Image (spheres, grey):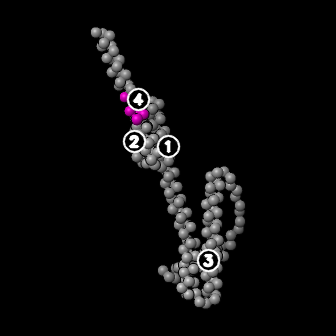
Amino acid sequence: LSRITGFVRDTLLAIFFGFRVARPLRRLVSATEAIGRGHFKDVPLRRRRRKDEIGKLEQAFGDMAQRLQEADEHERLFLMRVSHELRTPLTAIRGHVEAMREGLTEDPDAEAASLEVVAVAAARLERLVGDVLDLAKLDAHRFTVLREEVDMGRLLDQAYATFGEEARRR
């Protein structure tokens, strides 16, 4: 009888400690699956409840999930900004081309000015695409920095020529 009682006691202790170890590991598996689906906010972890190695693992995993969430948010904001920056010269090009198509620029000087705006906007678009490619090179550690002077007066004149017509229309 004492052997059976000892066996039952040992079995119950094994089950108890097994669940004590298995439960946080199951939470880590669920958290891993959530992150794999891109759900960084839904990481089902309890943080700082345990002081053992499993608790440290949960803490480190939660910190990693938080950093992944922040990186995902930064990437989303970056893509929004890039798309906005790329649309700006496209809008200027489209506006001036439509004005020329509709015959709104019958004056040769106005048409030449519109063509200049289109050329400048296309060059800006080309620079922006180059900048995106440079960022990819930076990420691949194949990047060099070149410095150049910028004529701010000329830059402001180009901005006025590019967006002046759109500003007047609005």
Q: Which residue type carries mark 4? A: Val
Residue under label 3: 118
Disc with the residue nearer the chain's start (4 vs 1):
4
Given the image, on which type of amino acid does mark 3 rest?
Answer: Val
Q: Main secondary structure of the magenta part?
A: helix
Viewer-side label of 3, 2:
3
Q: Are marks 3 and 2 in contact (CB under 8 Å)?
A: no
Q: CA distance from mark 3 to mark 1?
A: 46 Å
Q: Are marks 4 and 3 in contact (CB under 8 Å)?
A: no
Q: CA distance from mark 4 to mark 2?
A: 16 Å
Residue 21 - label: 4
Q: Could you classify mark 1 by the number of other residues whose Cα lies within 10 Å: few (under 14), some (14-19), or many (20 or more)?
A: few
Between discs 3 and 2, the one toward the N terminus: 2
Residue at numbered disc 1: 64
Q: Earlier in the sequence, mark 4 or mark 3?
A: 4
Task: Give the residue displayed 38% in from the left and 26% down from the top.
Answer: 18
| Gap in angstroms between the C-alphas marked 4 and 1 | 21 Å
Q: Assess disc 3: are there few (<14), some (14-19) or many (≥20) residues with their C-alpha within 10 Å of its C-alpha.
A: many
Task: State the residue position of label 2.
Answer: 44
- Does 157 appear in magenta? no
Q: CA distance from mark 4 to mark 3?
A: 66 Å
